[in-house]
Image (cartoon, rainbow, N blue to C red):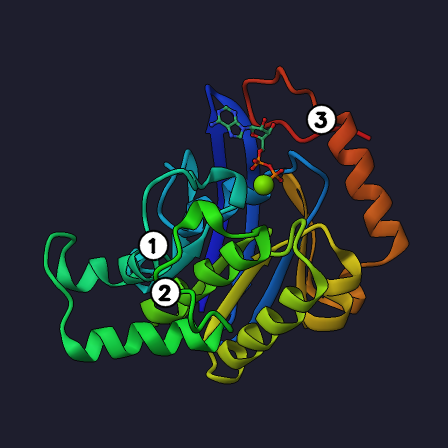
Amino acid sequence: MIYLDNLTMVYDRHPAVHHVSAAVEEGDLLAIVGPNGAGKSTLLNALAGLAPIEEGNINGLNPSDVAYLPQQSQIDRSFPLTVAELVATGLWQCIGFHKAINQKQRNDCEKAIAAVGLQGFENRMLNSLSGGQMQRVLFARVLLQDRPVILLDEPFNAIDKKTVDDLTKVIYSWHQDRRTVVMVTHDLEYVRQHCPKTMLLARESIDFGNTKKVLTAQNISQAQRMFEAFDLSATCCNRAVI
Ligand code: ADP
Ligand code: MG
C-alpha cells in the first residue's frame, strides 16, 4: 500500500497540490485526471521522489521502487543517443552510468525493445523518431527498469492509435504482474475503458476510488469549478470556496 497523507506541494509558496489523502493498493491501475494545471504532474513527481513535499507524507513507497515516465514535453530529443542507448539508461541505477552493460543486460535490453515493437530500430537516433516511436522507446526503458511501481505522465498525448493500443497491452501486462501503475491522463474515455481506479484532482482530490463512482458528471463539473475558483495568488493552503 502507498499512503498519501494530507500531501501538500508548493511552488514559490503557492500550493499546486494540497491536502491530498489516498491509499493506493499494490497492483492498482490508477488514473489521475483533472483540468490542465490541476497538479497532476506535481503529484506524480512527488510519488517519484523528484519534488520536495511541503506538508504531509507519502508512506510505503521507496523511490528505488519506482519507474517514472515523464511528460514528453520534458524530454530533450536532440540529445545524441540511439534507441538502444536510451533504453539502456534504464539500467543506470543498478550498474552506474559509466559502466558497460553485460551480455544478459544487453539481451534484456533487446527484449524490451522487441516488446514495444521497435525491433530493427536499435541504432536509430532519437531525433529521427516519430512521437509514437519515441513513446515506445520510453516504455521499453520502463520495462527494463523492472520496478514494482510505474508512474506514467500523459503517456498517450498526441500519440497515434496503433501505438496507444500496443502500449496499452504493455500496461495490462504490468497490471497482470501486480505492479502498481499510476497514470496521468486527460482522456476520460480511455480511463473508463482501461483504469479500474481514478483520482479526480483539482489541486485537492475531489474524489478517489472506483472509476465509475468517481467520473460522474457532477464530480467532473465540481472539479472544474473548484479549479476555477481557486485563488492562484494564495500563499497558504486555504481551500477554495465554491
Ligand atoms: P498538470 O500536470 O495537472 O497540468 P502541474 O502539476 O504541471 O499540472 O502544475 C500545477 C500548477 O503548478 C500549475 O499552476 C503550474 O503552473 C504550477 N507549476 C508547475 N510546475 C511549476 C514550476 N516548476 N514552477 C512554478 N510553478 C509550477
Ligand atoms: Mg502535467
Counting other residues with Cα less than 10 Å from the Cα at mark 3, is it few (<14), some (14-19), or many (20 or more)? Answer: some
**Residue 12 % position (x, y):** 46, 19
**Residue 24 % position (x, y):** 52, 65
Does the CB distance between marks 1 and 2 fall below 8 Å?
Answer: yes
**In this figure, which residue is indicated by the disc labeled 3?**
230
Outermost residue, left direction? 99
Sooner in the amino-acid sequence: mark 1 or mark 3: 1
**Residue 109 % position (x, y):** 31, 72
* Camera-nearest label, 1 or 3: 1
Q: Quadrant of the N terminus?
A: bottom left
> What is the C-alpha distance between the residues marked 3 and 2?
47 Å
241 vs 53, left or right, is right
Q: Nearer the viewer, residue 133 or 165?
A: 133
**SS at mark 2?**
loop
Outermost residue, top direction? 233
51 vs 32, left or right, is left
Q: Amino acid at mark 2?
A: Glu
Outermost residue, bottom direction? 176
**In this figure, which residue is indicated by the disc labeled 2?**
122
Q: How many marks?
A: 3
**SS at mark 3?**
loop
